[in-house]
Image (spheres, rainbow, N blue to C red):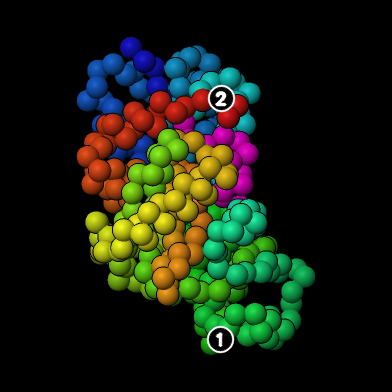
Amino acid sequence: MDKIIILAGGYSNEREISLITAASVTKELKKNKKYKLLTIEPDGDFVKKLRKFKPKLVLNLLHGRYGEDGYIQSILESEKVKYTHSGVLSSSLAIDKEISKKIFIKNKILTPPYFKFNFKKNLNYKNIIKKIDKMFKFPVVLKPINEGSSVGVYIANKKNFNNNLMKLQKFKEILIEKYIPGREIQAAVLGNKKLGIIELKPKRKFYDYKAKYSTSAKTEHLIPVNITYKNFNKINSIALKAHKLLKCRGVSRSDFRFFKNKFYLLELNTQPGMTSLSLVPEIASHNNISFMQLIEEIMKDASINK
């Protein structure tokens, strides 16, 4: 019997989603009698429980800071235990929206233009508005540098810019990015292979935290996507290229805007959700990959020092 630790919960703003993901995965794995499961939180007793249970691998289902930024990965590395999803460096690069964008730009992957805003250094808001007008006009996207699930992301116009900016003061530094209109399409990669794409039509302004996880938000999921074969191949190839550039493993999901026949990569997620509303299981299902098969494929790619 394979002993598997399911790591869930955590301290980020996405704690609740991590627990829902863990519940979904646990329910599925329990159908297979070959697994002995233990769900634990990354608390003060985490390492003690890890050493006592001696798992074959850790299924890392944490989301956000401390869970997919390289922090927990470095602990698992030091304990020399196999774990799922991307390693220390890949995780820290992907969650840092500024660094990952620089890597994408350097490697000729189109991503929205941006600049970094520091609340301590930039106190003259009139100058910021002038800079935005000069660089890329309104509306703009305001986002924390290292949060996931669209936590703290706002689309701002000139009238509500200051109000939305003030909501993000706790982050100290944020990105101000050109807003790209158009279609929202997500592409998934599994084990260095193209998994497929899905299009989202949120009832809200964009695919934010509520649109992702609330049944009341009623985001429409379109699969297969109405797109040319050439563009289908193109978006999948960009997602795979980004996955490989960051040296990701397991599964990743890249978020795109499709506008004027161009794909803009917004960000790459190294630990996408696995809830009933999550996109990767839906893409997998469309490709005749069951939820159990998807989980087991992710576990096959578990490793140390990669």
- Estimate the x, y position of residue 124 in percent, counting from the top left: 74, 81
Locate residue 115: give its quadrant: bottom right
Mark 2 surroundings: few (<14), some (14-19) or many (≥20) residues within 10 A: many
Q: Main secondary structure of the magenta part?
A: helix
Q: What residue is at 26 percent from the left and 25 percent from the top?
A: 30
Position of 184 with respect to 106 (left or right) is left
- Estimate the x, y position of residue 148 in percent, counting from the top left: 50, 53
Q: How many numbered tags mark residues here?
A: 2
| Precedes in sequence: disc 2 or disc 1 | 1
Q: Is residue 91 magenta?
A: yes
Give residue 304's mark: 2
State which quarter of the image contains the N terminus: top left
Closest to the observer: 202 or 192?
192
Residue on which disc 1 sits: 158
Identity of the residue furthest to the front in this view: 230
Q: What residue is at 44 percent from the left and 17 percent from the top?
A: 56
Of badges 2 and 1, nearer the viewer stands: 2
